[in-house]
Image (spheres, rainbow, N blue to C red):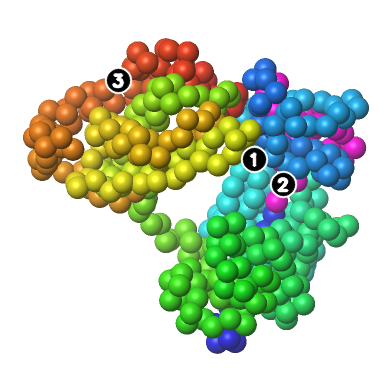
Amino acid sequence: MDAYKTYREIICIDLKSFYASVECALRGLDPFTTPLVVADEGRGGGSIILAVSPYLKTLGIPGRLRLFELPKIKNLIIAKPRMRTYLQYSSEIIRIYLNYVAPEDLHIYSVDEAFLDVTGYQNYYQKTTYELAQTILNDVLVQTKIPATAGIGDTLFLAKAALDIESKKVPSGIAEWRYQDVPEKLWPVTPLSKMWSIGHQMERRLNQLGLFKVGDIAQFNRDVLNRLFGILGDELYFHAHGIDASHIAKKKEDVRPMRSVGQGQTLFKDYDAKAIVTVLFEIIDDVTMRLRALGQEAKTLHLAIGYSKAFGGGFSRQITLPYASCDPKVLMATALKIMAAHLEDLPIRRVSIRLTGLQPFTLEEQLSLFDVKRSKAKEALFYQALDSVKHRFGTQSISRLTSYFESGTKKDRHHLIGGHHG
């Protein structure tokens, strides 16, 4: 395995309970002693809590639940989400990172997480990687009042694993994992979904193979993993040994074409089959507009429906079209076909559409789902005019009449950022 090992000095930084910590900073409060949650109380008890303060996490309050599920907590502060403010804080913290590394050595993983490749910077700063991580975290805390933790490793994967699994358990908030630490620190990890890149569905498939710890994957037959999971199987095997050949600078060069477009919504109340059609129309209008902006069409439509928590369950199904399309009518008819085949008579709380099999848009005529020849050229001109109005005057400037029904969500989402108020 040594032939596959690369050695970098990677720091992975996570801003602790970011949204909640920003709210505490704005109020001059200590996030480690303040009972605060970020949620829009105006949306009712079903509103999703976006973040809880580090103090509440020490009490065992999870970071994702609904307001009505929250236990009674003395002096609880419910802060309304301010997404624009959070993005401003994130931008300021990114500027702090750029005081220490060049842009090509910084990879922004999410609004509250980033990787820094500090290979070679130790001599410049006359600090070890651990000391440099301490300096950066302290700088972020002093300038923004936002606490952070960090993982350090020889690879991006090891740094991320150190962050996720150990950093929050040590007093310094900084964990360091090297290749030699893998048998002791990484291999005992269970359940497998605690390991970066393994979701619950993959975990179940691996469990069926008798793999329950990361060490089990490391000792498993690589060829079998490759045969079952393809390239992902190889990645799992190498990750289980701490090996990850990714470089941050290389990631920036490796810009891959978009493989899919999609959108989903968690609804604020239960919807029935009739009402959900309005939401589907709005989602399909949005994703097809993005498709047209990319000059793409989609061959496959995926529809996922989640039922109310009282019932649980749902379904995720897809249909591949005989030809690629970015026509909302064709894609809506496809979504309705899936619904007709799989939807149960249960209240709906989540819905999402994803379009895959993208390919460049062409004016070549095709037969529709109903075997009627369409004029793609005329439709293209119509949607080009429609999109130009929306680009100039905003997406709310043209809407379907159904969006103004009580079941429509577009009118309420217009002023939101990331689904929440700015």
* Distance from Cα at disc 2 to Cα at disc 1: 9 Å
Q: Nearer the viewer, residue 168 or 329?
A: 329
Task: From the image, tell me which residue sits under label 1.
Answer: 90
Q: Image check: 263 left or right of 75?
A: left
Give the label on residue 389, or none.
Answer: 3
Q: Is residue 227 magenta?
A: no
The location of residue 345, given as percent across then percent down, is 47, 30
Q: Nearer the viewer, mark 3 or mark 1?
A: 3
Measuring 65% from the left and 45% from the top, which residue is drawn there?
A: 112
Q: Nearer the viewer, residue 379 or 96?
A: 379
Tag 2 near tag 1, CB within 8 Å: yes
| Residue type of the residue flagged with mark 1 | Ser
| Residue type of the residue flagged with mark 2 | Leu
| Residue type of the residue flagged with mark 3 | Val
For numbered disc 3, what is the local secondary structure?
helix
Measuring 64% from the left and 50% from the top, which residue is drawn there?
A: 113
Q: Which of pointers 2 and 1 lies earlier in the amino acid sequence? A: 2
Tag 3 near tag 1, CB within 8 Å: no
For numbered disc 1, what is the local secondary structure?
helix
**To which quarter of the image does residue 325 belong?**
top left
Quadrant of the frame with the C terminus: top right
Quadrant of the frame with the N terminus: bottom right
Task: From the image, tell me which residue sits under label 2.
Answer: 15
Q: Which residues are magenta?
A: 14-41
Q: Is residue 350 visible?
A: yes
